[in-house]
Image (cartoon, rainbow, N blue to C red):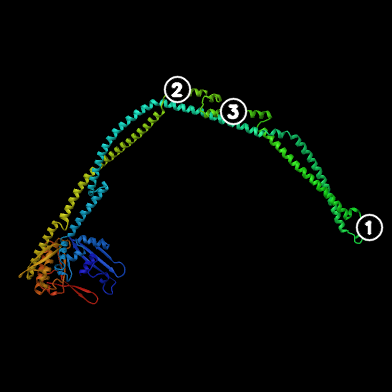
Amino acid sequence: MIDGITFSLFGKTTRGNEEDLLRDGENQAYTKTNFAINGQNFTAIKKIQKKGQGEHKLLDHSGEPIAIRSGEVKDEIQRLIGLDYDTLQIASIVPQGQLTDIIDSSQTTKLRNLIDKVMSAEHFSITAKKIDEGITAFRRHLHAQYNYTDADISRLEDEIKDAKQTRINSSKGLEEFETKQKDAEFARDETLKKLDRLKESESKKKLLSEKENSVWQAARNEITRLGKEKGEKSTIVEKCGPCFEIIKEKSNIDELLTKEATQKKELEKEISKITETLGEYKNKKDIVKEIEFTDGECPICHSKDVELDKNYQTDHINAELKTLENKKLKLDDQIAKLETSISKLEGDKDDIIVAENTLENFSINSKAQLTECENDIQSYTNQKDRLEEFTDSHNMAGLVECIPNIKESLSEIETLQEEISGYRPEMYAQLVDVEKGQTKALEEINQKIGECRSSLKVSEDHIVKHEPILKEMKLAKTYIAKLNTIKDKIFSTNSITFSGLRNFTIQSISDNASQYLEKLKTSVSHVKLNPEGKSIKIQCETITGSRPIKNLSGGEQVCVALAIRLGMADLMIKSPLKVMILDEPTASLDRTHCEKFVDIIQELTQHMNQNQNFQLIIITHDEEIWDDAQISTLYKFENNKKETVVTRINHR
């Protein structure tokens, strides 16, 4: 029955796995519990299957689902009854054999935990946790808005302190550098005035240098020009000088070429005739070989004593061939000599053509022109030598003889030299160096002033921005400290408030339990629960004096445990779930104490039902204890081979 209730509410039992809950041979099972909270009816249903998923749901009074998933059902039931599975097991359900667990001296913290749960200590812890969460969220808000929290107050104070010191140092530094700036500007202005006075002389000095350089450059240019002209004339003389001697043989060479070419042609004709004759004789020689006589007999007509033509006689033919070949060799030798001579004459003719082209290219028509070029070369050499002499000796006046157009420039140079006589260029250079140094120093001072102003602005901005933040963080720290004080002094389970409430609860339980012990007529007349650290010590007053719980008999211990449970039941009126289940609470009681127990629970039920409906469910094998009891409902559970049979018993 207990497992059925807890399984439908929380999906948990004391039996372990869900498979252990199935009856042998069955594939599915379910539990269904109807309960009422503050006048509202609810139904919790839990189904399991051997294969596949089961279901867990919570329905309202009309059968509409409130939650249909196991986790949601558990959370919603815990919210409705104010108890989770473990707390329900301790506060409202006492399984068989666990009645005396709360007074077991080896488990001294169990009673303390049970009392804390009955007092809803978890609500204090939840509230304390919510305060911590609120503080954490508040700090997140502070960090998001200000990038600081109350934990950064010390760092903020140090940053602002450093910024203020930086502001002081920057202001002092700015004042010092501004004074240095004025002094540096004055010194540079004085130097600039001196430079202005020397600038005209320096300008004339530069102009004089430019004009002198211009004159010397003109001399160098003239030297270059003369050298170039000399080179060009020398090239003409060198190239054209031999040309006239080569050209004067032109007519003789043409005549000789014509003559020797004619001779060559005649010799070539004669060689052609000889070559033709040689061919004829060679043919005759071949014929003679074919008609050769044997023993003086003609091979054709077989006549004897025939006299042959000498032109068909071998000896004569050989003699003629030799004569002709010798003659041809002589003619070939003559032609070779003529060809050599012709080749030389043609080379001479090519030289004449080159010479004519050279003269034409340089526009030279006569030897007189070459003589004129030679005279120009000498003139250029003389002028160039004189210019180089004047240049090497820095004789600018002498240059006028060679370059007349620089006379005006020389006059201007003389005037400038007179005007800057006595001027000391090194003084101007020194002042320029001084001015550069002063300008550089002034730039460095200005840079330092900029740095000081930037540092001053940054520190001012930091102070203006962070002082209000520091103020807010201090207020936040005060606020958080107050919240922590409220949490620690009121909502902490270690607070004075909760400890006082616990002590009051323990005293109430002690008083209630003592009243129930008195009604049970045991040897224990009074029980006292004393908190010690995180445990509860139980001291019992008997007719023989004060005794610890462990020194009582088993029956007496059951009576004390039952009295404490009943004493706690008074406090359960405050729980939304108005029920307590005791499994075999009289197992260790004798008949007299059993009867007293029944009287007490009737009295307790009547007391609790004065203002609200409270259920006290007793599970027992001892049916006789109900013989004289006034109870509302009595059910009998019997097992057969197939199922559990539940029968309602009519009771007086």
Name which of mark 1 and mark 3 comes first in the sequence.
1
The alpha-carbon separation of the residues under discs 1 and 2 comes to 134 Å
Query: Residue 423's quadrant in the figure?
Result: top left
Q: Which amino acid does label 1 sit on?
A: Val
SS for tag 2?
A: helix
Query: Is 155 positioned to the left or the right of 553 in the image?
Result: right
Instruction: Look at the numbered discs 1 and 2 and tell me whether their residues touch, using CB distance below 8 Å.
Output: no
Residue lying at 55% horizontally and 25% vertically, measured from the top left: 403
Between the residue at mark 2 and the residue at mark 3, the CA separation in whole angstroms equals: 34 Å
Q: Which of 166 and 378 is in front in this view?
A: 378
Q: Quadrant of the C terminus?
A: bottom left
* Secondary-structure class at tag 1: loop
Corner quadrant of residue 73: bottom left
Marked residue nearer the N-terminal end (2 or 3): 3
Looking at the picture, tell me which residue is in the foreground, 386 or 622.
Answer: 386
Q: Where is residue 575 in the image (x, y as percent from the top left)?
A: 16, 61
Identified by mark 2, the residue type is Glu
Considering every residue shown, the one lying at the far bottom of the view is: 641
Q: Residue 420 carries which label?
A: none
Mark 2 crowd level (few <14, some 14–19, many ≥20, 10 Å Cα): few
Q: Please tell me whether mark 1 or mark 2 is closer to you in this view.
A: 2
Asked which quadrant contains residue 383, the reply is top right
**Residue 601 appearing in the image:** no
The amino acid at mark 3 is Asn
Residue 444, percent from left and from top: 33, 36
Q: Mark 3 points at which residue?
A: 382
Residue at image location 66% in from the left, 29% down from the top: 371
Tell whether label 3 touches label 1 (CB within 8 Å).
no
Q: Mark 1 points at which residue?
A: 306
Task: List the residue tagged with mark 2.
Answer: 418
